[in-house]
């Protein structure tokens, strides 16, 4: 039996699986986000512990015999959060989360101080951990001076579970302090933030042992003192759950935001197009991500302004869509990451005429999001990353019309996995199995069975290639119009 524990922004999930990775039990507990000022986003680490106690305790009560045969625990969690501890491991302030934007002004300062692009392989963005610490140093110096350790969110759970200060490579890469090629902390990048290696946790691979479960917790839950795996950041753990461990086939997550994930065999950054380049959760493997900020959220926005539910809007678009919408849409409702790196980018409909109606707008939104994913494809390929097919996951992947549009616009074969839970908690459980057995092969990290495949339609693909040219030309023209700056 293996336990995967995933710390999400809105809740924590525990998943118990057997040796064949069949689900034995799942438990959830909610979490809240505090926003004390505009652009801020924080959580109390104590709430993570309370929620973890709840979900693991629930599995222990419901499946005591299975839990008694537990062999290992794996961890996953939202990345980039800054959890600051003093020398006695007391939390000094609420954790500053991945979607907190307060450190925007510190990004340019850090970029000028050291070679973050070359060593960390990523642009310095407010979402990452390093600028958050510079903000603390400049705005809460008394907190900064007391900071003895900086932990990522899931690694604070590890400290509670094992008593060890440990991080793993995929999550550590999202701090901007990791030498991503060497898979080690960079003294140069730490020094640029006023920190030292002594304030960092030890590093392990995600499939390695990071510590052993504390005796008191093992007794409380009726489990052995099992090893706790390094685990993975949420997207890397999701990739582990889907078997996306080698180049060629990635995953496309069509959720509130959008992610195109591809595994790579070497370190291959492309900071010019705002590609995220991180270590994967298994040794000698890396990954890249194109990230868009408003995927299904674009359809949610259209739902809110029209008063029509999202499923109703989606149903307005034919599953056998054969021609592009006459309307075009830029999905930059919350700014954009890949490839623009422009938090002030704005969304737009263009090409509107009096005869156009809501079906045209709904299809235009789907197409605009598909064009944004096309940007991500080009950005990854410019970095030398091959990707020909992708597992389609997330709420938007339930729309056959959207998948047909997506495949034809991006040129990807989209694979629909059979029903099942292939998320980060499942990937964390697989990393627990790898930790317990030493096996990082396809036997552990198997790909899911494919229920259906959506391939590009040649005629639609040609039409979308022409529409993509107009899409790419629209952003710089709209950006420079007076009154449209963010």
Image: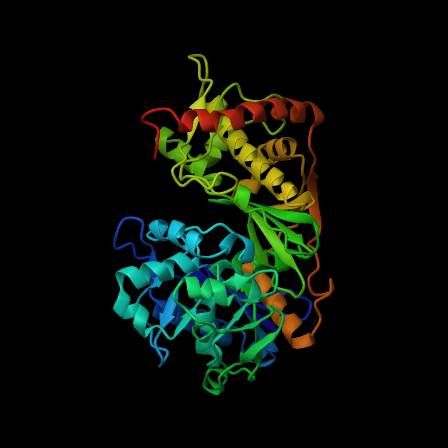
Picture residue at 61% right of the left edge, 54% below the top: 287
Picture coordinates of residue 53, whole percent (x, y): 42, 73
Q: Quadrant of the N terminus?
A: bottom right
Picture coordinates of residue 166, whole percent (x, y): 50, 74
Picture coordinates of residue 143, whole percent (x, y): 29, 69
Picture residue at 62% right of the left edge, 68% below the top: 431
- Give the vertical position of 58 relative to 305 (above or below): below
- Judge from the rendering whether residue 252 lies leftward or rightward of residue 100; answer left or right: right
- Give the vertical position of 121 relative to 410 (above or below): below
| Near-viewer residue (80 or 73) | 80
Furthest-top residue in view? 354
Furthest-front residue in view? 113
Q: Quadrant of the C terminus?
A: top left
- How many numbered callouts? 0
- Judge from the rendering whether residue 183 lies leftward or rightward of residue 215; answer left or right: right
Colour approach in the figure:
rainbow
Residue 254 shows in this picture: no
Picture residue at 70% right of the left edge, 65% below the top: 444
- Judge from the rendering whether residue 193 lies leftward or rightward of residue 218; answer left or right: left
Picture coordinates of residue 32, whole percent (x, y): 34, 58
- Judge from the rendering whether residue 200 lies leftward or rightward of residue 121; answer left or right: left
| Near-viewer residue (401 or 390) | 390
Residue 257 shows in this picture: yes
| Near-viewer residue (271 or 210) | 271
């Amino acid at each position: 039996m293996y336990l995967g524990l995933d710390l999400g922004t809105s809740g924590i999930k525990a998943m118990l699986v057997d040796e064949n990775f069949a689900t034995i039990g799942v438990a959830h507990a909610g979490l809240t986000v505090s926003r004390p000022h505009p652009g801020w986003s924080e959580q109390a680490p104590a709430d993570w512990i309370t929620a973890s106690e709840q979900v693991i305790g629930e599995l222990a009560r419901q499946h005591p015999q299975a839990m008694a045969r537990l062999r290992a625990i794996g961890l996953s969690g939202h990345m980039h959060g800054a959890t600051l501890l003093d020398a006695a491991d007391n939390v000094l302030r609420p954790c500053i989360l991945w979607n907190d934007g307060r450190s925007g002004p510190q990004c340019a300062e850090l970029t000028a101080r050291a070679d973050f692009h070359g060593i960390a392989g990523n642009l310095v963005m407010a979402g990452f951990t390093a600028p958050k610490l510079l903000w603390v140093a400049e705005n809460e110096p008394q907190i900064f001076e007391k900071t003895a350790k900086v932990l990522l969110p899931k690694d604070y759970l590890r400290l509670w579970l094992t008593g060890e200060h440990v991080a793993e490579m995929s999550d550590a890469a999202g701090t901007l302090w990791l030498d991503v090629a060497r898979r080690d902390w960079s003294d140069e990048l730490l020094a640029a933030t006023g920190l030292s290696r002594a304030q960092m946790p030890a590093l392990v691979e995600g499939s390695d042992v990071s510590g052993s479960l504390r005796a008191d917790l093992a007794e409380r839950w009726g489990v052995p003192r099992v090893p706790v795996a390094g685990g993975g950041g949420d997207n890397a753990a999701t990739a582990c759950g889907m078997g996306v461990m080698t180049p060629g086939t990635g995953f496309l997550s069509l959720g509130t935001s959008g992610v195109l994930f591809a595994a790579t065999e070497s370190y291959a950054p492309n900071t010019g197009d705002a590609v995220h380049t991180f270590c994967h959760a298994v040794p000698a493997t890396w990954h890249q991500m194109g990230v868009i900020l408003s995927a299904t959220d674009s359809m949610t926005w259209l739902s809110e302004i029209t008063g029509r539910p999202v499923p109703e809007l989606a149903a307005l678009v034919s599953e056998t869509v054969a021609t592009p919408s006459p309307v075009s849409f830029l999905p930059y409702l919350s700014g954009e990451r890949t490839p623009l790196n422009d938090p002030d980018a704005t969304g737009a409909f263009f090409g509107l005429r009096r005869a156009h109606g809501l079906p045209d707008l709904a299809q235009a939104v789907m197409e605009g999001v598909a064009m944004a994913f096309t940007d991500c494809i080009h950005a990854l390929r410019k970095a030398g990353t091959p990707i020909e097919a992708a597992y389609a996951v997330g709420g938007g992947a339930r729309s056959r019309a959207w998948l047909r549009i997506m495949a034809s616009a991006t040129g990807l074969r989209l694979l629909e996995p059979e029903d099942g839970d292939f998320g980060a908690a499942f990937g964390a459980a697989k990393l627990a199995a790898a930790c317990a057995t030493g096996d990082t092969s396809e036997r552990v990290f198997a790909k899911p069975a494919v229920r259906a495949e959506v391939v590009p339609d040649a005629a639609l693909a040609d039409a979308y290639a022409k529409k993509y040219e107009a899409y790419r030309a629209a952003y710089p023209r709209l950006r420079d119009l007076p009154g449209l700056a963010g």
